[in-house]
Structures are given as C-alpha cells and as structure tokens.
Amino acid sequence: MKPPRLYRAWVAASMVLVPFLARNEIRKLRKAGLTSLRAHETLGHATELRRGTGALIWVHAPSTDACHAALALISRMGLALPNAQFLITSSSAASAPLVAARRPPRCIHQFAPLEAPGPIQRFLKHWRPDAAIHVQGNLRPQLIRTTHASGTRMALVNAQMPDRTAERWRKRPALAAYILEAFDLILAPDDAMAQAMVDMHAPPPRVARVVDLAGMSAPLRTDTAALANVQNTFGARPVWCAHISQAGDEKTALAAHKTLLSRWPGLCLILVPDHTAHVHDLEHAIAASGLSQSKESAGAEPPAQVHVADTSDVSGHWHQLGQIIFFARPSQHSFLDAAQTGAVSVMDGRNLGSADPNAAWISAGAAHVISDSTELAEKVQA
C-alpha cells in the first residue's frame, strides 16, 4: 500500500522536530529520577547492549495500563515459549518501577524510541525482533510501518481507544488503513471495539474479539516481612490511602482528611505516589494544608496525620493495610489492583472519561465515585 500524503508529511515533520522532542522527553525522564543512560533509550540507544540469541518477542505497551496487560501476556507466553526472550517497551516514567516489580523471567525493559526515523531505525537495528505486539490502541504510525517494513510479523492486542480517538482515525481513512494494514492480527476486548477497528479500515479477516487482558494481570507483589513491619508500625490505628499520579492529585484527599480528623483524630492518610519524583511536591502540599507529615524513608519516625509512601514497589503493602483506596485519576488497573487485596476503591468522577474502562465495575457498584472532597469524606466515613 502506498504511503498517504499525511503520513509522508508526518515523517518529514518529525525529522525536523526530533531534537526538540528528544530534549523534552529526556528532561521529563530525568526529572522523574531516571538515569541519563536510561533516558537516552528514547533515542533508540539500548541500555542492554546484547540482544541475545534465539527468538525475541517485542511487546510495546506505551502506558502503565498497557504495561499491566502486557506483563500478563508475557507471563503466559513465557510458559508456552520457554526458549523465547521478551522485550517490553513503554513511554511513561511511572512504567519503569511497575515493570521492575512485576517483570517476568527472560524479559528486558526499555523505553520506546521517539516517533522519528533515526531513533526507530536505531532501535530496530539493535533488537531485530522476530515478532512485535502492540498493546492497546495508541497507534504510532512510523513505529508501526517501519517495523512492518523490516519484515517483522505484527499484532495489535487488547485494541481499545476512546470514542473521540477512534472518530479522528475514521476521518482519516487513508492513513488509518495504511497503519492497520501493517498488523497481521488485531484482537479487541469486546464486539464494539472489534467493529470500530473494521470501521477504521482494518482488514476484517484479521480482526477478532478475545478476553480483556487487563483482567489477567497478577496482584501487586507484597513482601510478607515488609507488610508485617508496616502493620506493626501502625498497629490498630485507622488508615486510608490515596494514589497520586500527577501534581495536584492530593488536594481532594487532603481536604477530605481534614474533615475526617474532626471525628477520628487518630486517622492517618497514606499518600502513595506513582513515582518518587512526586514526593517533594507532596511535602509542600501537606505543609500548606497545615497537617503534620511523615514519610516511609524516615524509618523509625512514627506516622503523622499524613504519611508519604516515598519508597518504591510498596503499593501492595498499603492496599492491604488501608483497605480504602482513593484514586484521583482512575486507570484500568486501579480497581483490579485494589480488588485483588480486598480493598474498596473510591474514584474521582471528574477524571473519568466517557469510555472509561472501569465503567462496568462502577455500574455494578464495585467501585464508588465522588465529585469533591465532601463526598470523598462521606465515602471514607461510611
């Protein structure tokens, strides 16, 4: 299929913009605490210098949600293919600790190359994948078409995207057809999304519906000794947790906590940031709220009114300890991670999309939705 004009224009523009894109992406990863070596993976440079022999299956999972599904898939493929090596790529800084905590055997993590010819070609030249699996529907035209041109067999699994994104692709039929034609197999989690792929000009014989991979993700790892230690630290003291994904996510939780303290003076709010880079901002926000604070890295310091979980890979501990988890920015794995420990999920409805993957859980009453700090305080109290 001949590249459409819009695709050729995008390739040309990316060649001009790549220095600016690279500077921005590397700065973002460095600010999140990644080393310079790891941040430069976005330019296609490999931290893992040896590819290894044998078949290499590359799984691209741009977001943390996609990483959960990808890791579940890799775990099962690893059992079926005991001699295969796996490479998982992602784009967000928060994905690095997630993959490190749940990485299956024979699996390497790298950050995905930028959407530009140089980084992509450099990446493919080093890794030479035998198969490429893209998880969810964040379609990157150059990454997909360049991989296809290299002769690598490709699949799109757990294909899903918001209605608005799908509509934008439908308005560009030539580009959509050119991108989706590169996949040998497209697997959607439901009938509606399978039809949406066909409407976007994916070849119908290559589209099928299968189970949603998100439900296959393993529970968060919990170190038994570490969990016993935090249980001993808090004792019988009542606690609840709030997940922090971006700056400002803590505001609703802190306001609700001040209300709750009037009834339960000993109550502790545990703030669990997705990445330790958020800790400094959290400390300033807590100080501004007038609440006392402590943090996990301080060791023997007794928990204050607000306790910051500033050590990595401990979400499972706090979910089991708190049993009430507030997600300011709910994601597909939010409910599953909490439910697997028996915790109750409370989600901020202001950040729920029109096609939110948690909609089924919410409609079934398995997760609670709030719209402000007053409602959050009421839910936690209940």
Image (cartoon, rainbow, N blue to C red):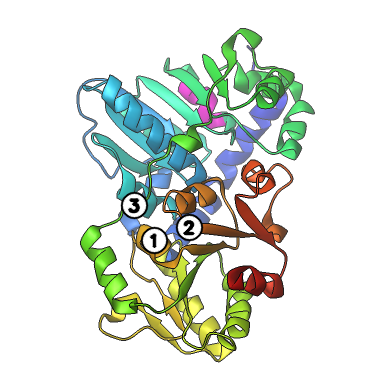
Quarter in which the N terminus is drawn: top right
State if disc 1 and disc 3 touch (CB < 8 Å): no
In this view, the mark in front (3 or 1)? 1
- Percent from the top left, x then y, of residue 131? 39, 20
Based on the picture, tell me whether residue 382 belongs to the magenta stretch: no
**Badge 1 vs badge 2, beta-carbon distance below 8 Å:** yes
Residue type at numbered disc 2 = Ala
Q: Residue under circle 3?
A: 38
Q: Camera-side residue: 306 or 100?
A: 306
Distance from disc 3 to disc 1, alpha carbons, whole Å, reads 32 Å
Residue 343 is tagged as 2
Q: Which residues are magenta?
A: 142-147
Q: Secondary structure at mark 3?
A: helix
Disc 2 secondary structure class: loop
Farthest-out residue, right: 171
Is disc 1 placed on a helix, strand or loop?
helix
Q: Amino acid at mark 3?
A: Arg
Residue at the image point whose x is 54% and y is 23% from the top: 145
Q: Residue at x 51, y 64 (%)?
A: 324
* Magenta: main secondary structure: helix
Q: CA distance from mark 1 to mark 2?
A: 7 Å
Q: CA distance from mark 3 to mark 2?
A: 34 Å
Mark seen at residue 5: none
Check residue 320 in the rendering and tell me which mark sits there, or answer none. 1
Q: Position of residue 349 (x, y in %)?
A: 70, 58
Q: Nearer the viewer, residue 190 or 115?
A: 190
In the image, residue 23 above or below residue 318: above
In-image side of 7 versus 227 (left or right):
right
